[in-house]
Amino acid sequence: MERRAFRVREKQAIEIPRSWLLGWKEALRYRKYFYDIERYCMFVGYPRSGHSLVGSLLNAHPEVVIAHELNALRYIRYGFSREQIFGLLIRRDQEFGALGREWSGYSYTVEGQSQGKWTRLRVIGDKRGRASTKLLGENPALLGVLKKRVALPVTVIHHIRNPFDNISTIARKGRVSLEVAAERYFRFVNWATGTIQEQSTAEVINSYHEDFIGSPQTELRRLISALGVSVTQEYLDACAKKVFPQARLSRKKVKWPSILTQEIEDRIQLYPHLKRYNFYT
């Protein structure tokens, strides 16, 4: 563990100065677009919840750039400026485009839409729900620092999925027991809940994965409206084609101990935004 922690610190010691210079370089390249930016958008939530899909669909809007997995809050913590953060966000989006917008075996390219380009850049942000939630859980004041740094209204998208699907996927992908996965999941729930309680209701938008799958155009229109921009039917139609026809019920692919199932359902009831869920719904 100590060796791994040392390697992480060593990597950061190299990466942060490099990113500092890259941030200024990209800021100089794109700063003429920064004057039109009206809002910053970020995600909080839980591992394996479907953030990537939602972020990519928002990113397909001609007035929105939502970078894939930059972890902008980390750079905020290191003192990067507004312009550096914006430059790095655009750079990350360009890099993701160069990779074909593929992630975990799935293509997030929305055909015919504005990924990697924009007509007028009005909304910018970062899709890094898991890491952002962890950082804010460990340092709640970081969100206030972000708001001051970007000097813009900040919209937080809280994307939520059935906890049993989250936990089963965490267990399978992480090769851990369901019990360990459940503890990891509820750690993120506590972090996210703390962050949400610090914000006004106008700043936090709950987005439910099952609702998004069931009615993608309605949910996407709601999220876009919260960001202060309008949509066309062509955009909504193109995005809807990227959404699976039904939610994947990964909870049904594993065998659940009945005691653990009941424990999770009891814990779900402690959080208002999760009360709609149980093992069967």
Image (tube, rainbow, N blue to C red):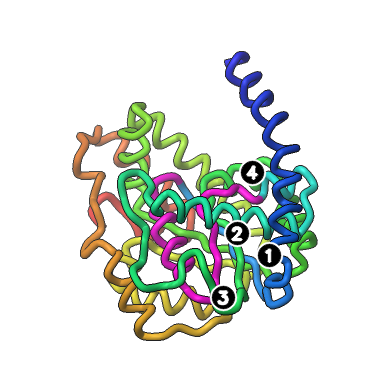
Stretch in magenta: 47-72
Which residue in the protein does label 2 denote?
A: 90
Which residue in the protein does label 4 denote?
A: 135
Location of residue 83 (image quadrant): bottom right
Measuring from the top left, give residue 88's x and y in whole percent: 65, 53
Query: Is residue 201 among the parts visible in the rendering?
Result: no
Residue depth check, mark 1 versus mark 3: number of the one nearer the observer: 1
Which type of secondary structure does the marked residue at label 4 adopt? Answer: helix
Which type of secondary structure does the marked residue at label 3 adopt? Answer: loop
Which type of secondary structure does the marked residue at label 2 adopt? Answer: helix
Residue drawn 54% across and 57% down?
67
Which residue in the protein does label 1 denote?
A: 30
> Which amino acid type is marked by label 4?
Leu
Residue 98 colored magenta? no
Position of residue 50 relative to residue 74, above or below, is below
Q: CA distance from mark 2 to mark 4?
A: 22 Å
Q: CA distance from mark 1 to mark 2?
A: 8 Å
